[in-house]
Image (cartoon, helix red, strand yellow):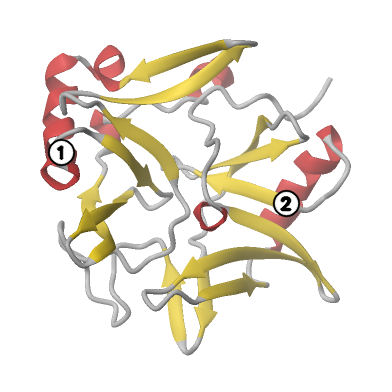
Amino acid sequence: MSEFFLFPGNCPRNVSKDAKYGVKSSRKGSLVGLTYCTDDDERWHMTTEAHPELAELVSAVKTTHGKSPYGPFYVNEYKQVIVPVGESSEYYFAGTYETPLRFEFDKMTISGEARDFDGRPLQPGDTWVGPHAGIPYVLTAAGDDIYYRTWPRPDVEKRVKLSSKRGKSAAQQIARLISAFKGSGGGRFYVNEFGSVFSPINESEGLRYVHFGQIDLDSWFPDPVAPVAVA
């Protein structure tokens, strides 16, 4: 029996390369990596040696259920490590990782914390300068609910709505906060392991990533692993 079970919650699919972390090989061993996109269209390929336990955890899942110990992984707002394996991309729960991921590059510290490069806290509406690694959610076109997609069996897609988990009133309240920045039509936004919410917004001068605020987990989608752990 495998020590890793399939992750039952929101599993990211079809996200860009800079929206995920990765385990990479080096002469010193396995490293945690991240691609960071700058405002002037540079792509920084950052790595850190500071998280060997995380790298080993991800590699254990990939070698248990796949072949290569390297490749992408995600950390959600509950700090749960989600690892896709194989061409069909089955997603496994690797465990919980509490240590903040930070990368040193060009004399700056890059992390998903809601702070600018000088360490000042970001306010809702400020430009998001952190990495784009996060878990995607969708604001409905009506702007009154939030959902994510799952694929419970072949050829079946299911939308898991916040209103079905926390009630219509609670979902509408959070959706209004998101729609204040996303505008009419809804669309995708991201939540990272620090609970920071951000999304790219089309403006007259081009695309800008904007910080929306922080998620309150007590009003958010419930911990997806808790029912599995109890069972």
Viewer-nearest of discs 2 and 1: 1
Please state which amino acid type lies under the numbered disc 1. Answer: Ser
Does any portion of residue 163 appear in the rendered image? yes
Write the residue at 30% across / 16% down.
165
- The location of residue 17, given as percent across then percent down, is 57, 54
- Locate the C terminus by quadrant: top right
Q: Which residue is mark 2?
A: 71
Write the residue at 81% across / 25% down.
2
Please state which amino acid type lies under the numbered disc 2. Answer: Gly
Write the residue at 66% across / 50% down.
72
Horizontal placement of 207 versus 85: left or right?
A: left
In depth, the one of 12 and 118 nearer the eye is 12
Horizontal placement of 32 versus 119: left or right?
A: right
Q: Quadrant of residue 187?
A: top left
Above or below: residue 163 compared with residue 205: above
Write the residue at 47% across / 89% down.
107
SS of the residue at dot 1? helix
- Locate the N terminus by quadrant: top right
Above or below: residue 164 compared with residue 174: above
Q: Which residue is mark 1?
A: 179
- Give the CA distance from mark 2 to mark 1: 34 Å
The disc, 2 or 1, on the residue closer to the chain's N-terminal end is 2
Horizontal placement of 221 versus 74: left or right?
A: left
Above or below: residue 81 compared with residue 133: above
SS of the residue at dot 2? strand
- The location of residue 197, given as percent across then percent down, is 29, 49
Q: Residue furthest right?
A: 67
In depth, the one of 102 and 73 nearer the eye is 73
How packed mark 1 is, by other alpha carbons closer than 10 Å (few <14, some 14-19, many 20 or more), is many
In depth, the one of 204 and 38 nearer the eye is 204
